Image (cartoon, rainbow, N blue to C red):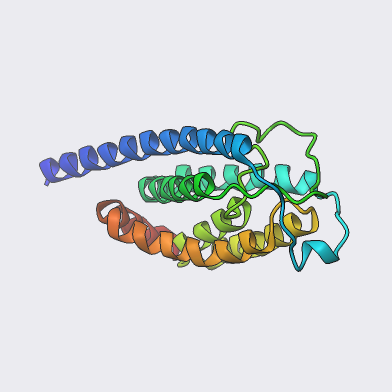
Amino acid sequence: MEQSKIITKKKYTQLLIEAIILFCISVYVTHLASRFAELKASNPVDDIILSNIPVYNFEFLFVQMAIALCLFVVVLCIKFPKTAPFVLKSVALFIFIRAIFVSLTHIGPFPTKLELESNLLDFITSGNDLFFSGHTGLPFLIALIYWGHPYVRRLFLMASVVFGVIVLLSHLHYSIDVFAAFFITYSIYHIALKLFKADYVYFSLEQNKTLR
C-alpha cells in the first residue's frame, strides 16, 4: 500500500515537472511566433464588424482582467494540485497550436486598432499575432477543463464572451479571430484528452473528490 502511494506520488511529480517545462517552452515559442508575425505583417483587410463600429478603449479590461483570470487559474491549481498537470499541459498545447496559426497567418492589424499603452503583455503578444484570439479561446479552454465545476465553468464562459466583445470593440482582433477561437479551442481540448491521458486521470480523481 505504502509503495503504491510512493509510486503514485513519483508519477504525479513527474507529470507536474513535465507540465511546467512544457508550459514554459510554449510561452517562449509564442513569443517567437508573435515577433515573427510582427516582422511579416502584411496589409490589413476589411471586416464586416470592425468596419461598421467605432473603436473603444477597453485596455484596462483587456490587460488587467486577463492577468486576474490567469492568477485565478494558478490559485485553482494550487488549491487542487492534482489538476495542475492536465491544466498546464492543455494550456501549453493551446499556446503551441496558436503559435503555429500565428506563424502561418500574417494579416496586418486593423487600421483603427486600439494602441495599448501597457507593456505587461509585450513578451507574449506584439499585437500582430491575430489568428486566433487567445483572449477569447483560453478562457473557453479553462471552462471546458473545469466543466464539472459549475461556478468556474460559468465564470470562464462569461469571460470568454466578454473578451470576445472587448477585442472586437477595441479593434484588436478581426471577427474571424474571435469566432474561430471557439471551434479551434474545442478541438484543442479534445486533443489534450487524447494526448494527456495520465494527467487527466489525476485531474478526474481530484475533481470527483473536491470540485463536484
Task: Farthest residue to the front: give it.
Answer: 43
Q: Tell whether 70 sits left or right of 195.
A: right
Number of marks in picture = 0
The one of 73 and 107 positioned closer to us in this rendering? 107
The one of 147 and 136 positioned closer to us in this rendering? 136
Residue at horizontal 84 percent and vertical 66 percent from the top: 52
What percent of the width, then of the height, locates residue 41? Answer: 64, 42
What percent of the width, then of the height, locates residue 135? Answer: 62, 52
122 is higher (above) or lower (below) than 161:
above
Task: Farthest residue to the right: give it.
Answer: 54
Q: Tell whether 63 sits left or right of 157.
A: right
Name which quarter of the figure residue 31 lies in: top right
In the picture, the quarter occupied by the C terminus is bottom left
What percent of the width, then of the height, locates residue 8? Answer: 20, 44
In this rendering, does residue 124 appear at all? no
In this rendering, does residue 209 appear at all? yes
Residue at horizontal 13 percent and vertical 45 percent from the top: 4
What percent of the width, then of the height, locates residue 83? Answer: 39, 50
Residue at horizontal 25 percent and vertical 53 percent from the top: 198
Name which quarter of the figure residue 81 lies in: top left
The one of 100 and 199 positioned closer to us in this rendering? 100
